[in-house]
């Protein structure tokens, strides 16, 4: 028993999904098993050289060794504005941009600005766990919006009860989607905006995967749609786009009032992102984007290899148009957890059980395209040997 009693908010938390996966993975590895990790969405590709060079140069400059601005360097925020203009055709004022220590930090903190105990947030499921955890840490409650195959893994806004919608203060959405790899179009975003305006809800769109896409598809930004700035903000990260997960740099853009509220929270909690990392971020956003295209090409090759293997085994999966995830239906007779345990213990393959992202994810498992083609081919071979 622990010596000190923990706060209720910690007692009520389930084990963090990926921490629990790491624990099980190490148990199997300790037995001498060669693990192929397709679990956590952490790019195996290195950060591009020109970005590393920019960090090295900035880190030597004493100007960047002091406390950074809470809202981000003006130069970095201007680079974000240029990126949004060039990539999405969206014009942003500096008051509509804030730098984050990775988008996870901002997603976790935005409920602190708007959720009081007893307040409601609309949260998709299956989903990135931080949406729900951030709300519950504030004493709020989550109304779950199930993401179902028959709806293209989009939330059914019409199914949200009137009394719930009337009380809701935040809505989280995420497209291209983790874990389902689903994408959203302008019509869906328009419906979200209409819904948010009707019920005075702040939309929080997690756009971490807009730059990872295949077959010529280019995901859109929520901010491209008329009215989006009136009702919400969009979170973005350099983590997946430029293989910078460990660097911890992201940003949020959109409604200036909401951005300001998030900034007020952050100024009382953290001291901003390291300026040298922001200088590297400027190089990433302003520099040659061929590295982004190269990443997508590599992930597309891996996707195709894995899809071929899954199809040969009779496993059902819609080829993703974006993200580096495969959302696969488990074979008949298995639960999500049972099948992922079988993959780990009998084949040395780490996959993420769908129900770990929420109850509506039961019946699926997620595989991340974060191993090279040889390792992906080995994973397919091992799965085929299981004779599912």
Image (cartoon, rainbow, N blue to C red):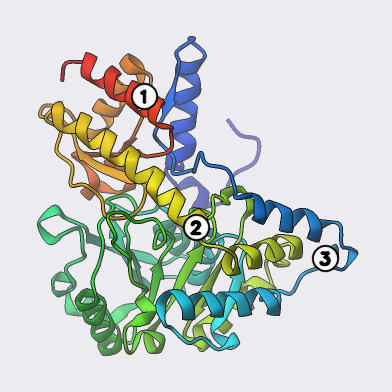
Residue 245: image location, x then y, percent = 56, 50
**381 lies left or right of 115:** left
Could you say whether the residue bearing mark 1 is in a helix, strand or loop? Answer: strand
C-alpha separation, residue under disc 3 versus residue under disc 1: 42 Å
Residue most extreme to the right: 62
- Find disc 1 in the rendering and name its residue: 349
Could you say whether the residue bearing mark 2 is in a helix, strand or loop? Answer: helix
- Find disc 2 in the rendering and name its residue: 290
User: Camera-side residue: 252 or 211?
Assistant: 211
Residue most extreme to the top: 32
The mark lying in front, picked from 2 and 3, is: 2
Residue 66: image location, x then y, percent = 85, 66
**117 lies left or right of 315:** right
N-term mark: 2 or 3: 3
Q: Residues within 10 Å of mark 2 (few under 14, many from 20)?
A: few
Q: Residues within 10 Å of mark 1 (few under 14, many from 20)?
A: many
The mark lying in front, picked from 1 and 2, is: 2
C-alpha separation, residue under disc 1 versus residue under disc 2: 32 Å
- Find disc 3 in the rendering and name its residue: 64
């Amino acid at each position: 028993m622990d010596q000190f009693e923990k706060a209720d908010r910690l007692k009520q938390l389930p084990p963090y999904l990926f921490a629990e996966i790491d624990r099980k993975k190490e148990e199997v590895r300790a037995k001498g098993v060669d693990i192929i990790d397709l679990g956590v969405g952490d790019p195996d590709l290195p950060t591009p050289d020109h970005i590393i060079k920019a960090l090295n140069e900035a880190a030597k400059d004493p100007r960047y060794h002091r406390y950074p601005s809470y809202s981000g360097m003006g130069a970095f925020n201007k680079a974000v504005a240029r990126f949004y203009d060039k990539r999405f055709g969206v014009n942003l004022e500096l008051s509509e941009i804030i730098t984050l220590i990775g988008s996870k930090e901002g997603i976790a903190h935005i409920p602190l600005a708007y959720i009081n105990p007893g307040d409601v947030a609309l949260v998709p499921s299956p989903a990135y766990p931080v949406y729900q955890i951030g709300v519950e840490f504030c004493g709020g409650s989550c109304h779950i919006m199930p993401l179902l195959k028959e709806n293209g893994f989009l939330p059914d806004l019409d199914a949200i009860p009137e009394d719930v919608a009337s009380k809701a203060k935040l809505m989280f959405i995420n497209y291209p989607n983790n874990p389902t790899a689903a994408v959203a179009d302008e019509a869906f975003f328009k419906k979200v905006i209409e819904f948010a305006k009707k019920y005075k809800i702040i939309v929080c769109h997690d756009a971490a995967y807009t730059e990872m896409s295949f077959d010529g598809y280019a995901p859109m930004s929520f901010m491209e749609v008329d009215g989006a700035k009136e009702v919400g903000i969009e979170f973005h990260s350099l983590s997946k786009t430029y293989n910078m997960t460990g660097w911890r740099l992201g940003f949020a853009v959109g409604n200036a009032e909401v951005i300001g509220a998030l900034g007020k929270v952050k100024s009382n909690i953290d001291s901003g992102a390291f300026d040298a990392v922001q200088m590297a971020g400027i190089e990433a956003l302003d520099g040659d984007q061929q590295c982004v295209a190269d990443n997508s090409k590599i992930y597309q090759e891996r996707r195709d290899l894995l899809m071929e293997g899954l199809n040969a085994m009779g496993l059902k999966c819609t080829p993703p148009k974006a993200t580096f995830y495969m959302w696969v239906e488990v074979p008949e007779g298995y639960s999500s957890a049972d099948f992922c345990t079988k993959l780990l213990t009998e084949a040395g393959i780490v996959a993420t059980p769908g129900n770990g992202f929420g109850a509506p994810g039961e019946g699926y498992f997620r595989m991340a395209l974060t191993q090279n083609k040889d390792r992906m081919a080995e994973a397919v071979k091992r799965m085929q040997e299981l004779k599912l």
